[in-house]
Image (cartoon, rainbow, N blue to C red):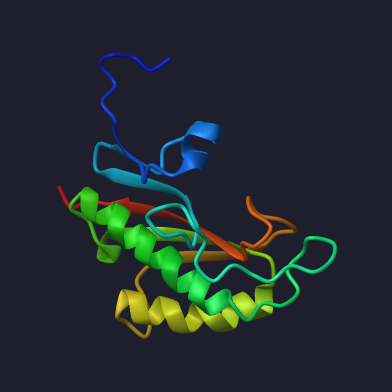
Amino acid sequence: MQRPDHKRRIENFGVAWEALFGYAQAVQVKDTIYLSGQLSHDGQGNLIAPAVLDAHGKPADFSAMEAQVRQTYINAIELLARFGATLDDVVEETLYVLDVPEAFAAASTVRKQMYGAAMPSVASNLIGVSRLAFPEQLVEVTFRAVLDG
């Protein structure tokens, strides 16, 4: 239970899985904003560029990786803006991916475009995982941003 004197600001997109799982998309405590794992969805919760699945329900190829990474960053930018923040305020990100080489190639291009720098000033982690929340999902990214006081 949250203490009454503990101030947090919460933001959500209003997509179905927020209520199903029970979490906030973003939480601000003092000058720090924590973004939950962001996906490549639109405003209605439809996945953008979902991976084609094979007969076993696993991604058949990873050609949608770049489009998913791009939409994931677009969603993060939208959430950050609700707090008056931008990607310039991000100090750390973690990319969880199904295919590390494909994600490295796609994310290295998209990240530089999104941050507007050849060498973004952000600590970054790229971690290979066996599965994400949705079978068609290839990438999920968490962010931590700090606002200048």
Q: Quadrant of residue 127?
A: bottom right
Judge left or right: residue 77 versus residue 141. left
Relative image position of residue 39 (x, y in whole percent): 50, 58
Q: How many marks?
A: 0
Q: Quadrant of residue 10?
A: top left
Q: Nearer the viewer, residue 44 or 8?
A: 44
Q: Quadrant of residue 49?
A: bottom right
- The residue that appears at 37% across and 85% down in the rendered structure is 118
Q: Note whether 103 is above or below 75 in the view shown.
A: below
- The residue that appears at 43% across and 14% down in the rendered structure is 1
Q: Nearer the viewer, residue 29 or 37?
A: 37
Relative image position of residue 16 (x, y in whole percent): 48, 41
Q: Note whether 64 is above or below 134 in the view shown.
A: below
Relative image position of residue 145 (x, y in whole percent): 32, 53
Relative image position of residue 133 (x, y in whole percent): 63, 50
- The residue that appears at 64% across and 70% down in the rendered structure is 51
Judge left or right: residue 63 versus residue 80. right
Q: Note whether 109 is above or below 57 in the view shown.
A: below
Q: Residue furthest right?
A: 56
Q: Note whether 116 is above or below 90 in the view shown.
A: below
- The residue that appears at 40% across and 48% down in the rendered structure is 35
